[in-house]
Amino acid sequence: MTADSVVVTGLGILSPLGPDVATTMQGLLAGESGVRRIPEQEWGKTPIHLSAPVPDAWLEELTETERRRYDRSVHLALAAGRQAWRDAGAPEVEPTRLATVVSSGMAGLSNVAVALERWRDKGPIGTPATTVPGIMPNAVSAVLAIELGAKGAASSLVSACASGAESVAQALRLIRNNEADVVVAGGAEAVIHPFVLAAFAALRALSARHDDPAGTPRPFDRDRDGFVLGEGAAVLVVERRAHAQARGARIWAEVLGAATTCDAFHLVSPEPDGTGAARAITAALRSAGLVPGDVGHVSAHATATRAGDVAEAAALRQAFGPALARIPVSALKSELGHSLGASGAVAAAVAAHSLHFGFAPPTRNVSEVDVGVDIDVVRDTPRRLPVNSAAAVNSFGFGGHNVVVILGPP
């Protein structure tokens, strides 16, 4: 721990379990499910009738202009970003030393679908003027930069479901490279739409347990059958420790290290033996100056797909070796669904909170851990974390993207 180390001073979350960090964490620690049945009138448009949405009522602070002008992913990013900024104490920082890195894997896709329907119905006159701003992937970061007056870097990284975690990794790089003192980092995703559900269903990636919404998804379970499409956002205020200490800020956690790799194997399937993901874990530990035994918790990517969970478990065994037997593993998507590009940022925010208070959330719906997994999955109740241990956040995406962020206690 040095004055130049990088810390988290603000957290903001909107999830299917709550409109803020406290409510979301309460639901996670209680093992609640955010999965819901899709309204019956939508069933004919998609073979999948499950999703994990954020209720519209949790976006009440948005103005009518913001609702009309921006895509829903930006709505979520704004709400989570405002939470995080308030939580951090609205730090005073030279504008050119303040950056935003907020990302999305498929931002604006549902907006495209709606605009296309209107164009088909009415032609050019029916095309909304908000279409282009609504489909810009960088809007989730740019809108927050405008709101906060951030004149440093303002970027959005598109690495599929690893986008949010890679934003946190980029925040660490910006501060370590002395390009910023404070970075607002995270991810947002809102693509629960019949077209998107049908597209993922065509890949056989989604759970079809329509008669038991709360009983799916089932990460690492023998009977898993895919993920549930969710939505949400998480934003972290990441700051140079000296800057945080100078203003007396509360610190949630320290960002110790991060790494990114690529499987270079297949566009939508993970490398079966988990080698690429294992390299990311090992490189992230090296970036943090840690060894496997220093880690006391893993927040797994764990989408509950057949191939993905086995590959991740193999990666954990390769990277942690014998130490893995003493490391509890949580899988948040069992409660929250899979919010794609936001999921890694949500996992990082939850891990920061978990380290601060010393408890890892449980994983729902694990009746029998698959024989090909063989890891210590946190089940049923929260698990107390070892004092002064680190947490590894895994986030993987289509294209073979592997991102691992290592967080430590405050």
Image (tube, rainbow, N blue to C red):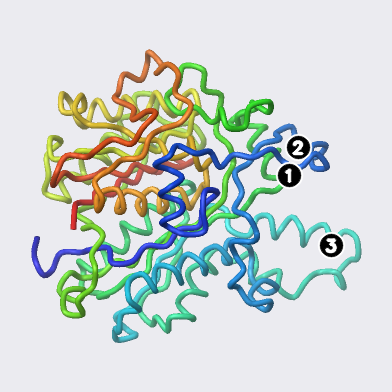
Q: Indicate the secondary structure of the residue bearing disc 3.
A: helix
Closer to viewer: mark 1 or mark 3: 1
Residue pointed to by mark 1: 194
Number of the front mark, 3 or 2:
2
Q: Is residue 255 left or right of residue 53?
A: left
Circle 3 residue: 118
Q: Are marks 3 and 2 in contact (CB under 8 Å)?
A: no
Is residue 10 positioned above or below 200 on the image?
Answer: below
Q: Are marks 2 and 1 in contact (CB under 8 Å)?
A: yes
- From where the camera sits, is residue 215 visible? yes
Task: Give the residue at the far bottom of this rendering.
Answer: 94
Q: SS of the residue at dot 1?
A: helix
Q: Residue 46 got which mark? A: 2
Where residue 390 sits, quadrant-wise, is top left
Going from N to C along the chain, the mark reached first, 1 or 3, is 3
Quarter that holds the C terminus: bottom left
